[in-house]
Amino acid sequence: MFRNRAIGLALSALIIASLTACSTPVGSSTEAANTKPAAGLPSASAEDVGMSGERLGRLAGAMEQLVDDRRLAGITTAVARHGKLAFFGTFGQRDVEAGAPMTADAIFRIYSMSKPITGVALMMLYEEGKFRLSDPVAKYIPEFANLQVAAGPKGRQVEKARHPITIRELMTHTAGFTYGLYSDSAVDTMYVEKKVLDFHGTLRDMIARLAGIPLRQQPGTIWHYSVAADVQGYLVEVLSGQKLDAFLQKRLFEPLGMVDTGFYVPKQKVNRLAQLYIYGKDGGLLPPSRFDENPMHIGGVLIDSDEVVTRYLTPPTLLSGGGGLVSTAADYLRFAQMLLNGGELDGVRILSPLTVDLMRRNQLPRDVKEISPGIGFGLDFAVVDDPVAADGISQGEYFWSGGAGTWFWIDPVENLVFVGMIQQFGAERPDMRSLSRRLTYQAILKPAGRLPATSQ
């Protein structure tokens, strides 16, 4: 049912008992470098990568405090700089009711952090000459030929699209699609009524449903969050001749050593899956078995507690490139480090440096408003164009997040990757990206970016 899709969609970044950190962060100056911890990269002391281990302790302290204050059940965070792991911390519990501590190998529903992975898969095919970014999507998905666009005061009339949607527009959320959750329009209502992203269906079913619904707005006119990455997943299948899960496993996950990333959690790993929580009326954390005590709607769609429990336990029929993957902090750190390295990790090349550079450039048309102050959008990543307006540090930082609070960023100026994992729905959720960014950058004592000379 479409309501089940609510927990698999990307949701905007909004984040139980008194808990304590269950492991010690790595990266202190007393630890040996070049070990291979659970985070998937060789480690070094914070000082060896130009950071302060003492100051990174502030990051650990803040994560512990969020758990102690019962705002989050469990957290995993990792910081890598210059290709070395400087900090890896697990805090709180993976499952409060089971009394299970958070562990370094905990598996998380990463929801919209699936999108950059799908984008990389599509760009691998771009490098093989399979398509151009300016190509009409209908060239490869004929069902999208002659799409109409909602028009009129209430969006219940239609008009002809001014131009066919392109693959670049698909990868920048400017194609005209929507999600059915984040805006109130006649088209969004149709997405819900037609169950566009029904997890009991297939990607081909999704394409057929989308083809019968007008676009929410003219292609190339605005940035609007949408099912575009799910369409990209289908495009990967069309261009490669493989199912999306098979392509990702063979071409991306296996070469990168992402051993715990996929569309479901195998039976032998279920005991590592982190529990999902929502906030109760009293501010406490509720597990799925208690969701009915404070029914939570996302964009008017009820979160189904049964679906939360079962969604990722069996292979799905709908391979959602927009929000269907599970992963660990270690796996995602390797994926992000590959991008920071210009498409290569441990001697395995996934993309060329120029292709990665293309993905992390702002691709929005000049007359399309940025997605938030100082932030544009590349090919399946948000991109910091103006650090001052974006309340950031480095121009060119690129990032994204997931519906249950997972977040990451890549900073090519400071040669840094951050990955954070939680499993929490709700508007009361702390702003983890903002908090962790401040506490990470204050620990850098040898910045790579040029600083102006201080006056004497």
Image (spheres, helix red, strand yellow):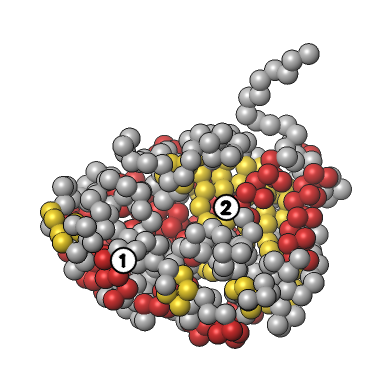
Residue 197 location in percent, x, y? 34, 72
Which quarter of the figure is the C terminus placed in?
Answer: top right
Say if residue 310 shows up in the picture: no
Ranked by sequence position, the earlier of labels 1 and 2 is: 1
Quick check: 33 above or below 50? below
Left or right: 355 as drawn, with respect to 394: left
Three-letter amino acid code at the position of disc 2: Phe
Residue 38 location in percent, x, y? 69, 61
C-alpha gap between disc 1 and disc 2: 29 Å
> Residue at left 70%, top 17%?
453
Q: Quadrant of residue 144?
A: bottom left
Circle 1 residue: 188
Camera-nearest residue between 295 and 406 = 295
Residue 360 location in percent, x, y? 45, 41
Q: Residue furthest front?
A: 153
Circle 2 residue: 408
Left or right: 61 as drawn, with respect to 362: right
